[in-house]
Image: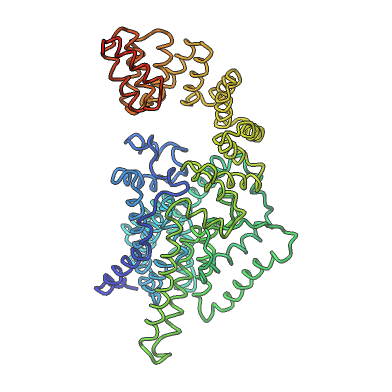
Amino acid sequence: MPAPTWGKTDWLLALAVIAAVMLAYAPVGQAGFIWDDEFHVTLPGLRSGFGLARIWFELGATQQYYPVLHSAFWVEYWLWGDAPLGYHVCTLLLHATAACLFAALLRRLAVPGAWLAAALFALHPIAVESVAWISEQKNTLSLVFYLAAALAYLRFDAQRERRWYGWATGCFVLALLSKSVTATLPAALLVVFWWQRGRLTWRREVWPLLPWFALAAAMGTFTAWVEQTLIIGSRHGEFALSLLERGLLAGRVVWFYLGKLLWPAELVFIYPRWTVSAAVLWQYAFSLAALGLLAGLWALRRRTRAPLAAALLFGGSLFPALGFYDVYPFRFSFVADHFQYLACLAPLALFAAGLGWAFDRRRTGSALLLPAVGVALLGGLGLRTWQQAHVYRDNIALFESTLAHNPDCWLAHVNLGRTLYKAGRVEAALPHFAAAFRIDPTDAEAHNNLGLALQDLGRTAEAQAQFEAALRLKPGDATLHYNLASLLQQTGRTDAAIAQYEIVLRIAPDHVEANSNLGNALLALDRTDEAIRRFRMALRLRPDSAVVHFNLGNALLQARQLPEAIDHYRMALRLDPADADANHNLGSALYNLGRTAEALPYFEEALRLNPASKEERQNLERVRASLGR
C-alpha cells in the first residue's frame, strides 16, 4: 500500500491540534514543580559535561535509568534553568507532536477517522497527568520516538529498504532509553500486521522484528532489576501477591483504565490502593469478564479483526503495569492515569473509526452530523482537560485534590504536610503528618516528619519519641540519626548529640551538616582542636557554605587564631552579607587585633541588621569610645 501524501489539509489539522493542546492546557503555564520533579530536572551534580556522562554511564545518578530522557532534561536546564514554564512548554509540544504522529500512523494504516482519533488523544483528560507533571515527560518523549519508530518500520515493511529499518531501529532504541514501556512496540506491530493481513509469516513479519524483541527483553529485564534493586529494595513485603492474586489484579486494572477512558470523571493523582485477595469471590469477576470479552472478540474476528486487535494492543501496552511484576508506585496505588498514556491509543482509534462508521452520511443522510458530534465531544474533553490541568499548579492544589477523593492516602498527607512545613506553616502541616502516622504507623518517614513538626513547635519530648520510634523501624538511616542528634543538641544534651553525630558520620562520612554540627557540639565542650578538624572537613565537602565558614571562624577565634578567623568571617560575609553575627564576630576579631578602625563598620552593620540588640549597641559604643568618637 503506498504511503498517503501529507497535504495542506493535514498541515492545517496538525496546527489545529497543536493550538487546541495549548489552549486546553493553558493553566499549566502558571504551574510550578510538583512532587518528585526536583529529582528529574537536572540535579546540580549532573549539570556539567561530566554530569551528562554520568547520566549515561553511572547507574543511580538519576532516579531511573532513562538516559535519553535525562539528556533532554540536561539540555532543557541549559536552555531555561530552573524555570518551570520551559519544561511545561516542551512537554506540551511533545504531546501535540505525538498526537500528529498518531494521525500520520493511522492514515498510513488507512484507519478511518485518523485526525479525530488524534484530537481525542490530544484533548483527553486521561493524558493530563502525563502532560502537566514534568516528571512524566518520559511519557511524551518516549511516545514520540515510539510512533516515529512505528511509522519508519511500516515504510520498511512496504519497501524493504534497509535505511528505513535503520531509522526505525534507531527511534525504537531512543524510545526504550526514554521509557521502557515502549518495549511493547514489536509485539504491537505484529498485532497490526495480523489485523491487516489475517495471518503472520515468519519471513516477512516475524523475522525482522526478532532483534527488536531482543532489545525489548533486555531493556525490560534491566528496568525490572533496577526497580527491584535500587527503588523497591527491602520493601518487597509491601508487594507480596500470589500469582493468582496478580491475575485478579490484572483483570481489575484493565477495566479500571477502560472505564476512565470512556468516562473520564473523578480523575485522581493517587487512587485508593485496592486490597487484592483470592478469597473474595467478586474479585474474580473482572478477570472472567476480560477473558469473556476476548473470547467474544475472537469469535467476531471472521467479520472484523479490528476490535480484537485494539483489545490486544490495549492490554499488551498495559502489560508492564498490570501487576505481574512490581513497580514502586504499587506501594500506594495499583493504578495511575499516566500508566495508560500509551495504551489508550488503540481504543481511541477504534472509537474514532466506529464513530465515523456510525455517523457516516451514507448511513445518516447528513454530512454535518459527524462534524457536529466530533466538535461537541472534543469540546467537552478539552474543557475537562482544562479543569483537570488546574489541579497540577502546585503541591498544595495537587494533594488537597487527592485527599478530597482519597482521604486515606498517606502519601498525599506526607507530601502536603512537607509542602506546608517548608512554607513555614508548621501548625497546618502537623495534622497531615499525624494522619500519615495513623494510616501507616510502621512507616519510619511518618514518624520522622511528625517529629520535625513537633520539634519546630517546641514539643521536644514528643519529637524525640517520634525520632526514636523511626530509628527502631529503620536503624541504619543517617537522616534519622541526624535529626535526633540535632534535637539533642538543641535541648543541651551535648554528649548524647555527639554520639548520634558520630553514628551519622560512620554511615555517611560526607554528611556536611553532621560534620558542621558535630564541630559546634565539640566547640561547646571546649574541644576546640577536634571542632576545627570537623569544620575543615565540612568545608572541603562544601566550600561555598557561609554557615561552615562562620562556624570555622568561631572555632579559630576561640583558639586565638585571629588572622585565619578573620579570613573565614570575610568569606562568610561574601556568601551571606546579611549575617549580623558574622559582622559582629568579624568586628570582634579585628578589634582584638587592635584594628579598631577596621572593626567599626562591621559593628555598625551588625547593629543595622539587628537594631533591637542591646549587646550590639553597647559593643558599638565601646568601639566608638576607644576611637575617641
* Residue occupying the point 39% across, 83% down: 370
- Residue 186 sits above or below residue 8 on the image: above
* Residue occupying the point 53% across, 62% down: 316
Which one is nearer the viewer's eye here, 205 or 560?
A: 560
Which one is nearer the viewer's eye here, 208 or 219?
A: 219
Locate residue 375: give its quadrant: bottom left
- Which color mode does the image show? rainbow
- Residue 36 sits above or below residue 321 on the image: above
Locate residue 376: give its quadrant: bottom left
Q: Where is residue 612 in the image (x, y as percent from the top left)?
A: 40, 27
Left or right of 323 in this view: 195: left
Work out which quarter of the rendered image holds the N terminus and state it. bottom left
Which one is nearer the viewer's eye here, 342 or 430?
A: 430
Q: Position of residue 41 (x, y in %)?
A: 39, 44
- Residue 538 sits above or below residue 589 on the image: below
Which residue occupies the extreme right position in the image?
279
Left or right of 557 in this view: 267: right
| Numbered circles on residues, count | 0
Q: Where is residue 237 in the image (x, y as percent from the top left)?
A: 66, 45
Q: Position of residue 556 (x, y in %)?
A: 40, 12
Work out which quarter of the rendered image holds the C terminus and state it. top left
- Residue 605 sits above or below residue 293 on the image: above
* Residue occupying the point 37% across, 37% down: 46
* Residue occupying the point 36% across, 20% down: 617
Which one is nearer the viewer's eye here, 77 or 608?
A: 608
Q: Is residue 154 visible?
A: no
Which residue occupies the extreme left position in the image?
8
Q: Is residue 77 visible?
A: yes
Left or right of 406 in this view: 381: left
Which residue occupies the extreme bottom position in the image?
365
